[in-house]
Image (tube, rainbow, N blue to C red):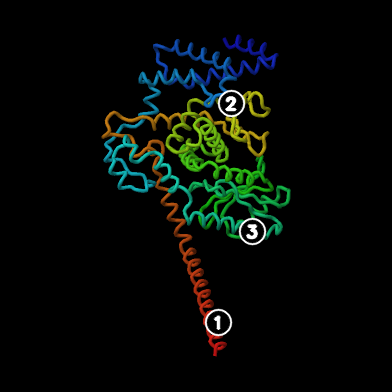
């Protein structure tokens, strides 16, 4: 069989079009098999393989139709898997009831709930009308985003780095970008900075790394000089914040400005992005160098989803963030076709065929996520996310968990909706206490200085008023 397959592939490889089609069919077969391998049993293994082959043939014939739809995806495979889930397959048991339900009185209330007493009085998750997923998403966003001390910490890192860079290159400028400048940073997010106007040689990397150590900014640095984008990475000695420095690349600040504009247009964008970003972080799927989805790519796919939802449902599409979150997990976890479809957010948003755009289809890895950079159409933002199939499984798992309720309302798997997919991380509170201890005294000094300035200003103002009153009296006399 192996020799026959080699001969068949050899003859088909002479024609490039047949070669591409052959590879695509093979990868589609692997895709559907991977989705259904946990649902198949020993008795119906032959019927499962027939369904997979039928799905591949139907998908090849209707690839153009799926591009036009709102949710282009694997309809036949999705139907097949949903039938298996209803039958109580191993796949459904593994991903929806992977923990035993416990009494709701024993479940902890998450720290992000604003009204903890009210949530604890419900004691089960079926009463979503009283504490809905929409309200919990808003509470989670307010809890997880930067506090006053977190903002001070990041500003302090940029300020001290700017002083060191200005001593080396007086004409340079230090510009922060990424989640720090867009306001979508998590407590553990690093600070991305680009130094513009530095020398073009790679020696500047090692020169800056040495000066950071001598100025007591950090104990150790990591210089990545052979990467596509050379970086200097270090951990700030004062507050423990991670800092990534790049040189003479203006795409980062420009992309951040684009995201800020979209955040103003779509009010649901920041809430969904932060929740999904934290969800991926807890599964180590949020780093691009590890094959996950980076912050910029995540914002773009959430934005594309909101653009399509606005087209379908009109201006009232964002009234409930909970419905939007479930729809996102369903789209990118079950329905979206990663093998054929690319994403563009320019204008009102659109999908395109990966085969019709140069640089967006990889023969060796056709499953990669294809996202058009709104600033540069030739740049595929998702080309480095080689673990995108793992991300899709995680999204599918999230949708299954959040739409499953036990039969007995006195027992549950989580105290709230978000705790079904997010676990409570106590390290966040510990880190914030450390940061608060570092900058609390500094904040008191600043407040005392401001009070002193106000007092001096008020005293001078009162003295001037008294002088004016005395002069008016003398003139009257």
Q: Position of residue 205 (x, y in %)?
A: 67, 50
Where 372 falls versus 183 (above or below)?
above
Assess whether mark 2 and mark 3 are in contact (beta carbons under 8 angstroms): no
Which residue is labeled 2 in the image?
Answer: 341
Sequence-first disc among 3 and 1:
3
**Element carrying mark 3:** helix
- Res 197 seen here: yes
Query: Tag count in the figure?
Result: 3
Give the class, few, some or many, for how many residues have Cα within 10 Å of label 2's Cα (few <14, many ≥20). Answer: many
Give the class, few, some or many, for how many residues have Cα within 10 Å of label 1's Cα (few <14, many ≥20). Answer: few
Which residue is labeled 1 in the image?
Answer: 468
Residue occupying the far bottom of the picture: 477
Sequence-first disc among 3 and 2:
3
Q: Is residue 238 toward the left or the right of residue 401 in the image?
A: right
Q: Quadrant of residue 418?
A: top left
Give the class, few, some or many, for how many residues have Cα within 10 Å of label 3's Cα (few <14, many ≥20). Answer: some
Assess whether mark 2 and mark 1 are in contact (beta carbons under 8 angstroms): no
Q: Quadrant of residue 227?
A: top right
Q: Is residue 30 toward the left or the right of residue 102 in the image?
A: right
Q: Nearer the viewer, mark 3 or mark 1?
A: 1
Which residue is labeled 3 in the image?
Answer: 164
Q: Nearer the viewer, mark 1 or mark 2?
A: 1
**Element carrying mark 1:** helix
Q: Position of residue 261 (x, y in %)?
A: 58, 44
Assess whether mark 1 and mark 3 are in contact (beta carbons under 8 angstroms): no
- Quadrant of the rendering where the C terminus is positioned: bottom right
Q: CA distance from mark 3 to mark 1?
A: 49 Å
Between 234 and 178, the one nearer to me in the picture: 178
Q: Residue at x 37, y 48 (%)?
A: 114
Between 275 and 313, the one nearer to me in the picture: 313
Q: Position of residue 454 (x, y in %)?
A: 51, 71
């Amino acid at each position: 069989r192996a020799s026959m397959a080699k001969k068949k592939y050899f003859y088909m490889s002479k024609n490039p079009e047949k070669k591409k089609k052959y590879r695509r069919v093979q990868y589609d077969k692997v895709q559907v098999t991977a989705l259904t391998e946990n649902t198949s049993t020993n008795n119906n293994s032959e019927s499962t393989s027939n369904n997979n082959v039928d799905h591949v043939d139907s998908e090849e014939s209707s690839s153009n139709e799926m591009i036009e739809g709102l949710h282009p995806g694997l309809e036949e495979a999705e139907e097949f898997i949903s039938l298996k889930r209803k039958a109580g397959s191993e796949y459904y048991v593994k991903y929806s009831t992977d923990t035993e339900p416990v009494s709701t009185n024993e479940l902890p209330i998450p720290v992000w709930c604003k009204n903890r007493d009210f949530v604890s009085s419900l004691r089960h998750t079926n009463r979503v009308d009283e504490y809905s997923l929409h309200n919990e998403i808003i509470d989670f966003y307010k809890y997880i985003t930067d506090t006053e001390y977190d903002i001070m910490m990041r500003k302090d890192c940029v300020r001290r780095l700017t002083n060191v860079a200005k001593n080396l290159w007086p004409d340079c400028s230090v510009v922060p970008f990424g989640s720090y400048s867009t306001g979508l940073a998590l407590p553990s997010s690093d600070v991305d900075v680009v130094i513009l106007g530095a020398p073009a040689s790679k020696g500047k990397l090692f020169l800056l790394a040495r000066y950071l150590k001598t100025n007591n900014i950090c104990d150790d640095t990591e210089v990545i000089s052979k990467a596509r984008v050379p970086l200097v990475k270090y951990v700030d000695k004062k507050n423990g914040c991670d800092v990534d420095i790049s040189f003479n690349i203006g795409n980062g600040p420009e992309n951040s400005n684009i995201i800020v504009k979209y955040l103003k247009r779509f009010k649901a964008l920041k809430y969904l992005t932060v929740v999904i970003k934290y969800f991926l972080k807890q599964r180590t799927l949020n780093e691009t160098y590890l094959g996950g989805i980076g912050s910029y790519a995540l914002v773009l796919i959430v934005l594309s989803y909101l653009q399509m939802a606005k087209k379908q449902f009109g201006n009232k599409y964002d009234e409930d963030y909970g419905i939007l979150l479930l729809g996102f997990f369903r789209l990118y976890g079950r329905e979206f076709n990663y093998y054929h479809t690319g994403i563009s957010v320019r204008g009102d948003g659109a999908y395109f065929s990966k085969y019709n755009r140069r640089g967006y289809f990889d023969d060796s890895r056709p499953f990669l996520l294809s996202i058009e950079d709104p600033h540069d159409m030739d740049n595929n933002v998702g080309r480095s996310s080689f673990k995108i199939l793992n991300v899709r499984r995680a999204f599918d798992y999230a949708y299954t968990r959040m739409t499953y309720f036990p039969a007995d309302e006195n027992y549950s798997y989580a105290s709230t909706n978000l705790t079904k997919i997010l676990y409570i991380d106590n390290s966040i509170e510990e880190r914030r206490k450390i940061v608060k201890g570092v900058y609390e005294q500094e904040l008191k000094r600043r407040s005392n200085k401001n009070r002193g300035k106000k007092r001096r200003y008020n005293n001078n103002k009162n003295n001037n008023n008294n002088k004016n009153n005395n002069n008016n009296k003398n003139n009257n006399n």
